[in-house]
Image: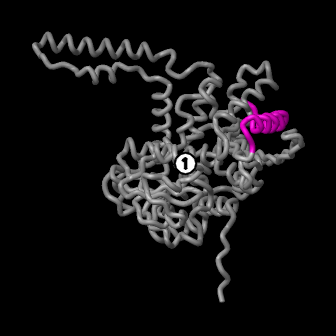
Amino acid sequence: MNAPLREPSFRESVDIMFNHAVRLMDLSPGLEEKIRVCNSTYVVRFGVRLRGAIHTFTGFRAVHSEHHEPVKGGIRYSLAVNQDEVEALAALMTYNCALVDVPFGGAKGGLCIEPRDWNEHELEQITRRFTFELAKRDLISPSQNGPAPDMGTSEREMAWMVDQYRRMNTTDINASACVTGKPLHAGGIAGRTEATGRGVQYALREFFRHPEDVARTGLKGGLEGKRIIVQGLGNVGYHLAKFLSEEDGCRIVAVIERDGAVVNEDGLAIDFLRTHLNACGGVRGFPGGTFHEDGADWLEAECDILIPAALESAINLDNAERIRAPLIVEAANGPITSGADEILRKRGKVILPDLFVNAGGVTVSYFEWVKNLSHIRFGRMERRQQEAQNALLIAELERVAQSAGLTAGFSDVFKKEYVRGAGEIDLVRSGLDDTMRTAYQEMREIWHGRKDVEDLRTAAYLVSIGRVATSYRSKGL
């Protein structure tokens, strides 16, 4: 009797996918090992006096690769945080940054805590002490190590972190660049909060610009009208669902959350659902759809596009054979295990990999880091000059038209939109869109150009590992 297949851990899945790609590359064993392993992992334990007693917390910061510095990666707050998970996520950050050509190494951090167990003041005390423990070990620094928000954290925690770092480094003129994902008033950048969700949208748009690629899924046409199921309505899931439904004409027919799934074949009202979720702690009772307690089963429901945007390993050996969506978009980190990935590929499913899809966050973090180092808001120097030039061109064209006896002119709406200069949010979106398009085209070139590359995930790893290898070689390794 055959033994049942063992599901690899999240870290093992990352290593399996890495090994699958490097078998197709010409790397020396030493360089291959150097790229694969995590450079260092720090475990910090610290006490905070809360509610009349001392509570001890455990935090992690893993640095996977320093082929570029600073290293970059979010900090998550969750009771499930552990060393293996943090190291696997740090590795993904290395490959993520390399794929979209952002000059950061990969890192990740976490604190073993349930944020909902503590009030805001207590969370601030915990966060500031965690920041102190990391900063005194140079694990937060504008030039060496830059955290960002992740699961369980937001721009609020980043504001506390940057303020704590600034208190410890009062003469560091670049202190604001020590973390990204900050509020605008604390040195953040327009568009960072929704950056990962926006990046998913741009990734899908680019995929649907290539009819040959869409044909591999069996789908037809563009994004408009596509039926989408989203797992997780957190920061990423909410923004991508909102953008896809409001801007691209998609129907979000189901949203899966912790307490179950809410379904509406005509499309869910995402803003109303998010308000209900925040108020009630779940999707149960939402009046705009039908609630189902068996939320995980809806990963297997019929739809055009399935977007797991919650935790890792949502699609695994247990359910991979029953997944019906022809196109799966990995908005979360590692939502498909390596075993499930193989099953899905054999079944002809097309997967847009997390390595590519969720790169929007780190891309806009890069823009924020550059903004902090340059000490000037994007668009501040050129926006009005650009508007003046555009207005001059419109005026001259209208003058020439009148001289030629033409009565028709430009509409007021066109003139307003054409004349308007690009502000920070416009430049951020333009840079993110360009980044996602370029990365997909580089993956696609390998996907279509090499007979030994059957999927986009392998293509993504080949691009990213190749760039990391080139960087290490230039350092003499």
Which SS does the magenta portion mostly show?
Answer: helix
**Crowd around label 1: few <14 · some 14–19 · many ≥20 (10 Å):** some
Q: Secondary structure at mark 1?
A: helix
Q: Residue extending furthest bottom?
A: 1
Q: Nearer the viewer, residue 266 or 373?
A: 266
Q: Which residue is mark 1?
A: 277
Q: Is residue 29 above or below residue 380?
A: below
Give the vertical position of 430 relative to 12 (above or below).
above
Q: How many marks?
A: 1
Q: Nearer the viewer, residue 360 or 456?
A: 360
Question: What residue type is disc 1 on?
Answer: Leu
Please state the extent of the stretch shown in magenta in the rendering: 118-142
Q: Left of 355 or right of it: where is 65? A: right
The residue under the point 65% across, 25% down is 186
Give coordinates of residue 18: x percent, y percent: 64, 58
Q: Judge whether residue 272 can be spotted in this image.
A: yes
- In which quadrant of the rendered image does the N terminus lie? bottom right
Is 358 part of what is drawn in magenta?
Answer: no
Left or right for 225, reference 161? left
**Rendered location of residue 139, percent (x, y):** 78, 37
**In this rendering, position of residue 142 left or right of residue 42:** left
Q: Is residue 138 visible?
A: no
Please say if 141 is above or below 50: above
Pick the residue in front: 261 or 466.
Answer: 261
Q: In which quarter of the view is residue 247 placed?
A: top left
Residue under the image location 59 percent in, 59 percent down? 21
Q: Residue at x 53, y 54 (%)?
A: 283
Residue 395: image x %, image y %? Answer: 26, 12
Looking at the picture, how far across and down is residue 264, in whole percent? Answer: 40, 57
Residue 125 within the segment the image draws in magenta: yes
Residue at point 74%, 53% (across, down): 79
